Image (cartoon, helix red, strand yellow):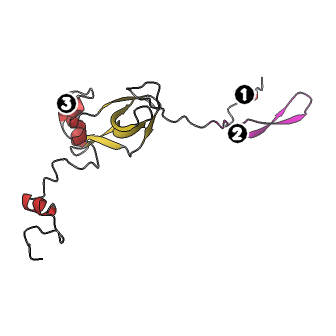
Amino acid sequence: MNDPASSSKPVGSTFSQADESGFTEKLSLKRSRRRSKRRELLCPRHPDQKLYSVSAKYHLYATEIGQVMLRGLSKRKSDELLAAFNRVLPLTGEWIECFWCDHCECSTWWYVKRHDQLEHTLSSVPRELWEQATGVIRVEGNPTVSDFSRRHARARGVTGMRQYRFL
C-alpha cells in the first residue's frame, strides 16, 4: 500500500517509511544519471556515416506570404503572422549548417529541418534558402553600397588606389 515507487515524492529525495511494528526505514530514490542524447545526423549520401558539425547554425526567416504558405499555413494566417512579427518571421526548427562526412572527406552545406528533439531531415540547400538565412553575406553585395564605392574597395595597389600611379 505504501509503495515508495508510486509515491509522488520528487526523484532524488529521502523520506521515511514506517511498517506496522513502528520501525522506521530511510529510503532514498536514486536520480537518473543518464545524459541526454545528442542529435545524431547521418550522411544522406552514405547512410552508415555520422556527420559532424563544422559551422554555426544559420537560422532562416520568412519575409513573404508565399514562404510561410509553403510551411502549411493559409494565405490569411500567413499574412496575420507576418504582420504580427513586423514582416520578418523567424522560422523555428529550420536552419542551414555545414557538416563533415568521414567517408566523403569533405564538408557540405545542408538544409536541416527538425521534427522533434532527436528527429532531423537533411536536404541540399537551394539558392532561395541562402537568401532567407541570417548572418550570410550576399553574393551580389550590399545593395546600399554604390558602384563607385564597390569598385574602389576592390582597387589594388600599394596604398589601395589604382588610379593614382605616382603614389
Span of residues in magenta: 14-34
For the point 87% across and 29% down, the residue is 19
Q: Which mark is residue 56?
A: none
Foreground mark, 3 or 2, reads 2
Q: Which residue is mark 3?
A: 76
Dot 2 alpha-carbon crowd within 10 angstroms: few under 14, some 14 to 19, many 20 or more: few
Location of the C terminus by quadrant is bottom left
Quadrant in the picture for the N terminus: top right
The disc labelled 2 sits on which kind of residue? Gly
For the view shown, which residue lies furthest in the top direction?
1
- State the residue at coordinates (18%, 70%): 158
Relative side of 12 to 67, left or right: right
Of labels 1 and 2, earlier in sequence is: 1
Q: Earlier in the sequence, mark 3 or mark 2?
A: 2
Indicate the position of residue 2 as horizontal and vertical percent values.
77, 26
Residue 48 lies, with reference to residue 59, above or below; the image says above
Image quadrant assignment for residue 89? top left
Look at label 3 and name its amino acid. Arg
Q: Is residue 149 visible?
A: yes
Q: Amino acid at mark 1?
A: Ala
Q: Secondary structure at mark 3?
A: helix
Identify whether 146 is placed above or below 69. Answer: below
- Mark 2 = which residue? 12
1 lies left or right of 143: right
- Determine whether label 3 and label 1 are within 8 Å by CB: no
Q: Which residue is mark 1?
A: 5
